[in-house]
Amino acid sequence: MTTNAATDPMIGRMIDQRYRVRSRIARGGMATVYLATDVRLERRVAIKIMHGHLADDAAFRERFIQEARSAARLSHPNLVGVYDQGAEADTAYIVMEYIPGITLRDLLQEHRALTPEQTTDILRAVLAGLASAHRAGIVHRDLKPENVLLADDGRIKLGDFGLARASTQNTATGAALLGTIAYLSPELVTRGAADSRSDIYAVGIMLYEMLTGEQPYKGEQPMQIAYQHAHDTVPAPSLLVPGVPSELDDLVAWSTARDPDDRPRDAREMLEHINGNQQRATGQYRTAVLRPENATAILPAGAPGPEATDATTVIPPQGGTGQAGTGPTGRATGPTGRGRNAPGPRRTGQAPGALSPASQRLADKATKRSKRGWIALVVVVVLIVVGAGVGWWFGPGPGGNVRIPEVAGKTVSQARQLLEAEGLRAADRTRTRFDAVVAKGEVSATAPAAKREVRKGTPVVILVSNGPRMITLPAIVGQSVTTAQAALDDDFDLQDPQYQFSADVPKDTVIAATGRATDGSAIDLSTVQEYGERGPVTLTVSLGAVPDVAGKSAADAQATLQQVDLTVGKQTEQYDEDVPSGQVISATAEADPVVRGTAIDLVVSKGPAPITLPDVHGKTINQAASTLEALGLKVSYPDCTNVLCGFYDWKSTLPVKGTDPGANATVHKGDTIRLSYDQ
């Protein structure tokens, strides 16, 4: 689709005083790609500019820039190079290598299915570039034919590295999402987790599509396709296109296994497998490296070129009859070309030592050539001097290029000194910006950015940190830990949670949230409404109440506490009338608050305390019973059967003769003591 300046205001715009936008190449859900000219280096580049409504989201904009920096770390012949990134007037952009040509999607739409040889050529190039990224710890996350570029000169490059995550997060429904869903791995569909094996799955889907001309899973809704990714197995391409080699069937099955552990661990392993198969191939589908039609050929040494018959012959200088040269045959010859002993024609009237007319003409030509040689030498010297002057001017001189030094974290005066020492001009006025890392008042960055190569004398604006951007805190205390982390993760730096036991707060609920002030002191975030962007946040999470081990045996109590990462501290024993011997009476923590690893002290019952039975011999029955019952003992005695007992209070009169057990015996509370008396 053609676009002019009337329909797209970016056409003709100069970005960062360096990139002149020429035309629009493509438009996606996240950004628009334009063809531009780098006026400083006079080369064509592709510049990706984030959509304006996304640039207003600071978090998304920061992610866009960070992903560009990740992609810029990669350098491989099969990866689209990233030259630069920056922002201007709330517009974030990435400058990339411009690849004139088509995409793999265009090729598939034109030819539908590819041959095994063509498929393997493209697959090797994609895996080679992807292996370089995987070695750097970068996962593409959005592999699809639209991101495989086929250059006009035969090169194959993988593009849009590192930007797929942001793109998918901002794609809602429709064809854009459907195109991405078609290559999502099962773990991305079910868990949202991506690693190098997720890229391998997408490569396997593309391999199937190149061999068959269609995607393995189809559906009217994205969820239908996602369900098939999670539950179905990709069929063999040979079922749809007979003649596909079995090795490629196996490669599709291996790379699209539903379990990530059953796939190649990264692109390098898959590429090495393909190369191994090619070395063992017997002609079934050996891959040939395609070369451009107009490639320059280098002739081997000794091979005759197209103009070998017109080789230059060096003529030796000629003198008088006594001088000799070397003829084409290698023999010594005189000026006439004959042999040394052959008689030459005699000249009459010629003074001794004078040159013949032919020799004189040769001498005159030699003199002219000598003059021309001196003139050429003077010209060369002048050119060398001029070249050295130009080199000095554009090198160490005032017209050369320098890299902007890194001044983040310096004071403004220190930054000015560093810039001026490199031959740059620090702008008189500084600008401020929010910075979550650099302290307020210190230099945050420069415009143009650090490490950019610019001309000496270029004005550089110093950006001073205004501290972190203050963000309104969501509700934290009393929320579940997963809810709180999801609310805080995009704007703040979540530290590892701290856990403690609490009898009042349910398990996995946030008890407190703590931040850090500029002086390093702790801040209770429940007492403030705003907190600095990317500031550290530590959540204190409840582990629930300490298990109640009262009434358990000491061994059971220890096992119960160990299950929640608590240990048993001191164990003491004491008598208890209500708790049986060997059972825990109480448990007390040695520290407050109680965290994992805290020791719990146990008090274990020894049962009721022993009692020495007193001697109640001679006391009346009522007196003896009162004494024993006061000790917690039970008393029994037989009824009086004497007829006289009915006429007086015999319990207050009759003396105790003995007890069972006897006096001084060891008894326990609750035991029954039997009294005896004479009736």
Image: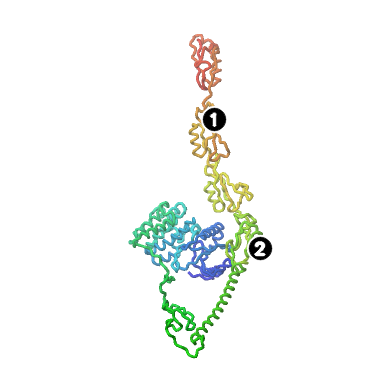
Q: Residues within 10 Å of mark 1 (few under 14, many from 20)?
A: few
Q: Residues within 10 Å of mark 2 (few under 14, many from 20)?
A: few
Q: Which residue is mark 2?
A: 429
Q: Position of residue 76 (x, y in %)?
A: 48, 62
> As drawn, is 329 to the left or to the right of 536?
left
Q: State the mark number for residue 585.
A: none
Q: Position of residue 264 (x, y in %)?
A: 42, 54
Q: Position of residue 205 (x, y in %)?
A: 41, 58
State the image quarter where residue 327 is shown.
Answer: bottom left
* Mark 2 secondary-structure assignment: loop
- Estimate the spatial distance between the alpha carbons at disc 1 and disc 2, rounded to whole Å: 75 Å
Identity, as a three-letter code, of the amino acid under mark 2: Arg
* Mark 1 secondary-structure assignment: strand
Q: State the mark number for residue 572.
A: 1
- Farthest top residue? 644
Identity, as a three-letter code, of the amino acid under mark 1: Thr
Q: Compare marks 1 and 2 and give the one earlier in the sequence.
A: 2
Q: Position of residue 375 (x, y in %)?
A: 56, 79
> As drawn, is 166 to the left or to the right of 439?
left
Q: Are circles 1 and 2 on residues that touch, CB within 8 Å?
A: no
Whether residue 120 is situated above or below residue 554 in the rendered picture: below
- Farthest left residue? 242
One can see residue 586 in this view: no
- Farthest bottom residue? 349
One can see residue 400 in this view: yes
- Residue in the picture at 57% in, 37% down: 591
> Could you say which is closer to the camera, residue 349 or residue 206?
349
> As drawn, is 252 to the left or to the right of 168?
left
Q: How many marks?
A: 2
